[in-house]
Each structure stands twice: as C-alpha cells, then as structure tokens.
Amino acid sequence: MQAASEAPARSAEARRRRVREIGRQCRRHDVQTVRFLYCGNDGVVRGKACHVRFLESYLESGIGLTVAMQSFTMLDQLVPEGAFGPVGEIRLVPDLDSFAVLPYVPRAARFLCHLRTLEGEPWAACPRAFLDRMVERARARGLELRAAFENEFTLARREGERWVPIDRSPCFSTLGMDAAATVMTEIMDALVAQGVQPEQYYAELGPGQQELPVRFAPALRAADNQITVRETARGVALRHGLVASFAPKPFPDQAGNGAHLHFSLWRLGDQANHFHDPRGRYGLSEAAYHFLGGVLHHLPALVALTAPTVNSYRRLQPRMWSSAYTAWGPDNREAAVRVPSLRRGREMESTNLELKPCDPAANPYLALGGLLAAGLDGLERKLDPGEPVLVDPDTLDEAERRRRGIRRLPASLGEALDALERDEVLRAALGDVLAREYLAVKRAEVRGFEGKGVEFEIEHHFLKY
C-alpha cells in the first residue's frame, strides 16, 4: 500500500517541478503570451492564448473551448448535421512536455493540448486521445511505433490576385537551395530550438517547393513534431513576407506536397527494431510483412485520414510519384508503401516502411492512430501483403492488378470517406463519437467545394495548410 500511495505523490511532485521550470523559461525569455494549440477534425491548427501572469492557473484547469469546434470544417463552417453545437464546453489541457518558446514570435510560447471533459477525462472526440489509445494498444503487445513525417511545402508570395512561388529552379538544385537559404536556415534553427531535429533539406521538384525530413520519434511525439514543423515553417515564412503552404496541391499543374510517413515498430523489452531481420527479404521481419499487410488491407479507408481534403486527390493520381494503388515494393516511388533501402552501417535503425499517400493537411494524430490500428490488425490476423511490385503499378493491365490483389485508391475524398465508413476496424478504433463527427465534417467539406471550381479550391487550401 505504501508503494501505491507514493506513486501519485511522486507524480504530483514531478508536475510541480515541471511547472516551476516552465515558469523559469517564461521569465528567461520574457514570454508574455502562451498559446494552447490543438488540431481539429478539419486538420487546421487552432488554439487560444493566455497571458503569462495567469498561466499557472490555466495549467491546472485548462482553457475553455466550445465543443462546436470539432464540428467545424476547414471552410470555417459549423456542420449542420454535426453532433456539437452552441451548447457545451471542453478544456484545452496542455501536455507539459510539449512546452516550447516560439523563436519566430516575439515573447510567445506554446503548448500542444489534449481535449478533455470538464471532469478532466479524455474527450471521446479528441484526436490526441485516439492516438494515445492506439499507442497503448501497441504497448500491450510490448511494442512502440516510431515515425516521422517527410514534409514538402511551397514558399510563395502574393502578387495581386495570384500566389507566385519564390523560384522555378530545377529539382534538387543548388539554385533552389540558394533562393530559399535564408528562410530555410531560420526554419531549421527554430525547429532545433523547439526540440525537433531536421535530418535533411533539399529543393524539390515543384516551383518554390522545399522538402524537410525530420528525425523519427515515438508516435505521440512524432505527431507533435508535425504540428511544430507546420507552425514553424509558416511562422518563419511570414517574417520574410512569404507564405509556406502545406496544401496538398497548391498549384494544379505542378507537383503536389506530400508528407510521406516513415514508420517502424520497436520492442520495448530490448529496444530493437521489430521490423528488422537481416535474414529477411529486403531486411524485413515477418512482423513487418504482417503490419504492411494490415496497412494495405485498410488503405482505401486509411487515406480518408492521411489524405483528408478535397485538394488531396489532385495529388493521388497515377504516374505522379504519389501512389494511386494498394501496391508495395522496394524503393518503388509509385507504390503506396515503399521499402526504403537500408543505410550501410545503420541497418537496424534505418529499417522502416514509407507510406506515400499521406499529405501535410492530415491531422497527424488521426493519421498515426489510423496507421497503428491498421498495422496492428495486420499483426493480429497475420495478413499477407502479397508480392512486391517492381514496376509502376499503373503499367500493369487491369487483369494483372486484379490477379495480384492491387486496388486503385479512392479517386476523391468522397470515395475515401465511403471506404472509411465501411471499414469496421478503423471505425471501431476511432470510436463512435470521433468516427461519426470526422465523417460528418469531411462530407460537409466535400459538399462545400462541389461546383465551386479549382480557383476556389486552391484559395481555400493554400493558406489554411
């Protein structure tokens, strides 16, 4: 009994120490306002802020938020058939470990938040709580998902009625690096200051397009890192009179912005990569193949979470290196799941899978939670991913794709939502409340863009992601 009673006391004392440390950091950096941020069903990063003088009290209680925000679309409209309206409130409760001083906003800091009930319990419509549940589901098997989003985004400026990219340099060119050097260096410095480590950087194929992979992390931290990358790139760009757009297809006739999701499972017991087997084909273990089988099996529904906007499906087209079929293969960049070649000398660390039909408009907590639910289902049922595809799957005729079990991914958000509604595993993982509201919000977005034309679509996606 003594040991059990000591645990909450130690936890409370650890919290008090963390709160005191946050207070010291605020004083050291002369912080005036602290933002409480979250990501909703629409994938838009939103939040409220408090003055630092009242921070400690809000760390205890959270900041009030209307429940209606989980029934908001990215067009900033309340869904008429949504479950949440003008009556009811929740709390934005910060994860104390997510505290960071914002290098790109003077005298400001931020937390990433849970959506909690007034009683302090996880809210059934909270995306972060969904990912927490899936993380615990993996932990019950002695496993931990580690992941990183490999973001592409576009640097542009407004000229009259048009968005104009900062340059039109060739793919991977030093011309592109030089054109964006000042902004990108500041973005990387700001990420490091917030505890996110960029691993690489290069100018990508599209006009003004940048790619910025960051270091992998446990699932919840990886989702938090994705919010940090999006917020930081946009905040720094704004200081330079630019916009950093993470819209999936910012220019209809140019390359789209992906957020390829790299992931692997690690064993908690010996801290070894559960996907790695030096004797396995492509260095993958049997468990990796079963997890892959689950991802491919659920992929038509999963893309409703990883490619979640009307604009996303301009990108998921054949022969665009974004994937359009439920195929996998070694270093096949037209496959939905690529098996990256291993890095010599770092074989275990570098063993991972890459999900390509994922873009930066995704709510990262929903994307990673859905990925975990799909992959764990594959592990439990020992699903077979089939044979690898060593060519562009679009070059196979329909009969051959059908023989190999390769399906076309949904061609629109509406089709993806239909697949999600039919997928009992993913809907059960989300829970009735979150699944129902997510589907309602996204179907309202589909209706909101019907008949509006491409200019309306681009305008509304360009700035919000």
Image (cartoon, rainbow, N blue to C red):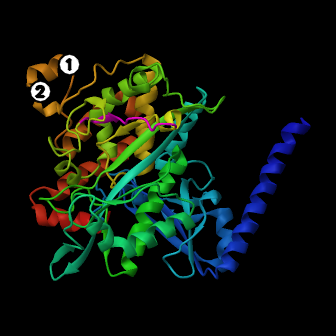
Verify CB contact (< 8 Å) between mark 2 and mark 1: yes
Q: For the residue marked with disc 1, what is the amino acid?
A: Arg
User: Between 6 and 264, which is closer to the camera in this rendering?
Assistant: 264
Mark identifier at residue 396: 2
Mark 2 or mark 1: name the one nearer the start of the chain. Answer: 2
Residue extent of the magenta highlight? 335-345
Indicate whether 126 appears above or below 380. below
User: Between 376 and 85, which is closer to the camera in this rendering?
Assistant: 376
* Mark 1 crowdedness (10 Å alpha carbons): few <14, some 14-19, many ≥20: some
The residue at 89%/35% (across/down) is 1
Image location of residue 452, percent across then percent down:
11, 62
Q: Quadrant of residue 386?
A: top left
C-alpha separation, residue under disc 2 versus residue under disc 1: 10 Å
Q: Quadrant of residue 92?
A: bottom right
Indicate whether 237 appears above or below 191. below
Q: For the residue marked with disc 2, what is the amino acid?
A: Leu
Residue picked out by circle 1:
404
Q: Quadrant of residue 195?
A: bottom right
203 relative to 393 in the view: left or right? right
Label 2, secondary structure: give it: loop
Image location of residue 446, percent across then percent down:
20, 52
Our reading of the magenta stretch's main secondary structure is: loop
Image quarter of the C terminus: bottom left
Mark 2 vs mark 1: give the one in front: 2
* Mark 2 crowdedness (10 Å alpha carbons): few <14, some 14-19, many ≥20: few
The residue at 50%/78% (across/down) is 105
Image location of residue 297, percent across then percent down:
31, 26
Image location of residue 219, percent across then percent down:
52, 44
**Can residue 431 be seen from the camera position used here?**
no
Label 1, secondary structure: give it: loop
